[in-house]
Image (cartoon, rainbow, N blue to C red):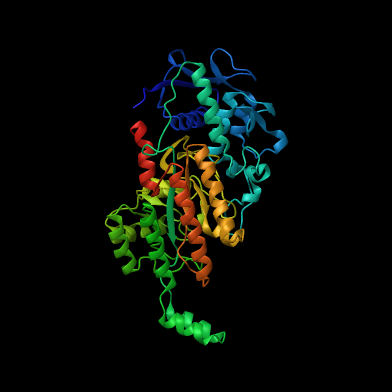
Amino acid sequence: MPAPLPCCVDLPSGTGLVRHGLAELLRGLGIAPVWTRRGDARLAVGVGGREESGGDLAVTPAALADLADPRVPTVAELGRLDVGGVAWPVPVGPPGPATVGDAVAGAAWWLAGLQERATTGRDVHGRVPYAATLQSRLGDAPGGPLRPAVDAVRQRLAEALGERGVAVPGRTWGGRAWAVALTHDLDAVRTRRVRAALGSLGRGKVAEAARRALGPDRRRASIRALHALGQRRGAPATWFVKPGAWAPQDVPGGLDPALVQALRQWRADGAEIGWHPGYGAHDHPARLAAEAERFSQAFGAPPRLSRTHFLRWDEPGTPRLLAARGVAVDSTLGWSAQPGFRRGTAHPFRFYDLEADRPSAVWEMPLAVMDTTLADHQRLGPGAVAEALRDVFDAARERGGVAVVLWHNQVGGDTAGWTARLDALDQELGRARDAGAALGPAGALLDAWAADLGE
């Protein structure tokens, strides 16, 4: 275990938030910060101008003002941090060349969700749309969805520490340099055969009606196919199940007895069972309490992992409510319409409760890509799906991070298309393992990553 690093953040405002950003950056380098007085610190963050002085990482007054009153800057307003000859965007502080201290404050801006707080627009499901984000404006440039800015700041911070004679041990995923987490949301686990058959008959499709009434249940069969994929690749998955149905967007029956029995068996082989709160539950304490109780009764323990249905999220309310029900790891924060890293990092991080001005107990394993994004939003064929997965995996590999993949079981009637996309995932998982990735469920991978610091 590496030696702790004495650190100090000495600012007139935003101290807790900047301290959080610095801690998360150091954590990804395998360094445990210990907060101390300025005179005893080997790494200090203080107020300054554009240049570092006195051994401090200087945060400009303009950056502190942007943390206190967050906004989403235009591309022209961004600061720029040079990392290996590449100019990376800094969303707080003055435009032009940025200090490392401002970049640390910018990392806090990303990780604490200040972009989302400053964005007023929401889609029909109450989510911040990708099109409204700074990442969408940056596109393929540094800081875009697949070029996470926080991880570039971490690299520059490592250089700054090296200049101060501080060793940077780095982190691994159980000895591997990067990781891919395989997860599945089980939104609908069995077909209502009578209704499905009647629907086909109503459209005059007699053969289809007979197949739906008497043939294999594609929803159950696809769950078995996903399990077989994990076994084939040595990658047990995290399965997110739905104990509640509160809205038309929810399908009842998420705790189907046959599914519960299968998941309990698969858990013995390394799979994880997570909680998938229903569409109307993410901000509703009573509904979350009811769902958590049903989950505990079905699986013999409270839920440790979560991902909300439709990726609905409200901060600080949702992580507070999840933590109250035993959740320690979440994996909700991705986009529905775009692959990439929503909070600017491919590394796990803790949420920051802005109202309480302290870190949350809940970790986020950031969702990087899901099948419905590629198939429904972007309408990609199997070959393009494989290429998109490769791009996401390469982005995680470049930063020593994790690519969390969400693949649903089949719900619609396009079995051939679903199977072809699953084959693309199978192919890219094999390629990732060959490229040195650790494969497995989200919680176990986080545990392996955290073990380097004894967390």
Question: Foreground residue, 206 or 74?
Answer: 206
Rendered view: 339 above or below 224: above
Vertically, is 17 above or below 41? below
Question: In which quadrant is the C terminus drawn?
Answer: top left
Depth order, front residue of 405/303: 405
Residue 377: x and y in percent read 60, 59
Q: Give the position of the N terminus as an image quadrant.
A: top left
Q: Position of residue 196 (x, y in %)?
A: 48, 79
Q: Is residue 16 left or right of residue 301?
A: right
Q: Nearer the viewer, residue 284 or 227?
A: 227
Give residue 175's quadrant in the image: top left
**Whether residue 277 is visible:** no
Question: Where residue 226 appears, x then y in whole percent?
Answer: 41, 61
Q: How many marks?
A: 0
User: Which residue occupies 56% across, 55% down?
Assistant: 336
Q: Position of residue 181 (x, y in %)?
A: 43, 48
Residue 88 makes an appearance in the image: yes
Q: Is residue 123 left or right of residue 346?
A: right
Q: Quadrant of residue 288?
A: bottom left
Viewer-nearest residue: 291 or 345: 345
Q: Is residue 78 above or below residue 339?
A: above
